[in-house]
Amino acid sequence: MTAPRVAILTVTTNAGAHLPAYLAALERVTYPAWELWVVDNGSADGSAACVRERLPAATVLENGANLGFTGACNRALALLREREDLEYVLFLNDDTEVTPGFLEPLVALADERTMVAPKTYLAGQPGVLDDAAGTFDWLRGTWKRRVLGRPEGPGDRYAHAVETVNLSCLLVPVGAFRVVGLLDDAFFVYYDDTDFCRRARAAGYRLFYEPRSVVYHRKGATLGGQASAFGCYYLARNRPYLIRKHRGRAAFAAFLAYYLATRAARMALWAREGRWDLVRATAAGMRDFALGRMGPRRG
């Protein structure tokens, strides 16, 4: 039986520091039917050339500017969803390192209506989990049971259905992008994954966690992490956008009261710590959401 074909989709943005380790891990993958698609967001450090040199068979698309995670992915997905010889697209961050046999369990559990995510550890922290799969709290707009930094337990060692995953690694049947659509470009980065999972599940797709597949994630290596000014801006702006998009007026009003109170408290804490960059970024994100300024940050 022929193995289903998988296109691995990766976005790079000045990823030279960690890209060699990412590519080296891919070179050891044992699954027989995969190809690599890399979309480079205007890198100035030779990231695209690094991919071409290490994996000449890869398809590399170069953007003249930073289109964000959503814009870069959508450029490739618009092409991939037209492929009749392709069964799956695997989102895979360039700051991950996969294990050689990670793809086989994902493909074995997936089908034309089933998306599958691996068990993801934080790189350099054996047995400590990344917040890559779980349940989302639509009242507060956060993970319901925070996984990040938690040692794995018995419940993390068997396959089970989940509500949402992040796109650091997720196997998706290519037909989903015809039915559900592409990523919402309004997000640019952050919360686009929660939005896509919500839309996919509403369209009848299943989402599973498969711990036999193992990936390591260098959290924040690409974008600087959620405690950077970049992260704070997009998180502050996109979180209320996500809730408003998927919840009714009453639910959004209740969320907004909670959100504004907690953001004010967080900004006060940052101010006491002298992190005025985070205060300004969060305030700018909240302002731009109110003004409807989505997509890439302006100014």
Image: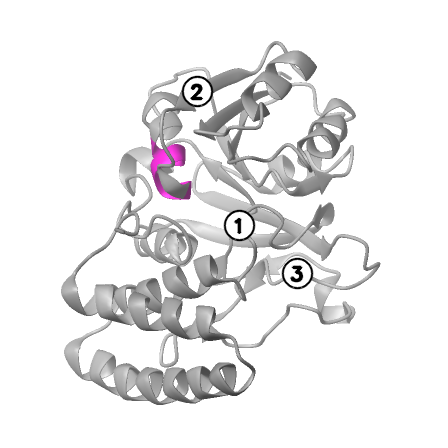
Dot placed on the residue nearer the N-terminal end, 2 or 1 = 2
Dot placed on the residue nearer the N-terminal end, 2 or 3 = 2
**Towards the viewer: 157 or 281:** 281
| Residue 71 as seen in the image, left or right of residue 24 | left
Q: Residue at x 45, y 15 (%)?
A: 85
3D distance between C-alphas at marks 1 and 3: 16 Å
Would residue 137 be seen by someone viewing this image from the given angle? Answer: no
- Give the residue furthest to the top: 56
Residues under numbered marks 2 and 1 in contact, where contact means CB atoms less than 8 Å apart: no
Determine the image quadrant of residue 16: top right
| Magenta stretch encompasses residue 70 | yes
Q: Is residue 204 above or below residue 78?
A: below
3D distance between C-alphas at marks 2 and 3: 29 Å
Q: Residue at x 31, y 65 (%)?
A: 237
| Percent coordinates x, y for residue 7 in the rendering | 52, 25
Q: Is residue 192 above or below residue 43?
A: below
Residue that numbered label 1 is attached to: 223
Residue that numbered label 3 is attached to: 130
Residue that numbered label 2 is attached to: 61
Tell me which amino acid carries mark 3: Asp
**Towards the viewer: 158 or 76:** 76
3D distance between C-alphas at marks 2 and 1: 20 Å
Dot placed on the residue nearer the N-terminal end, 1 or 3 = 3
Q: Magenta segment, which residues?
A: 69-74
Q: Residue at x 71, y 46 (%)?
A: 215
Tell me which amino acid carries mark 2: Leu
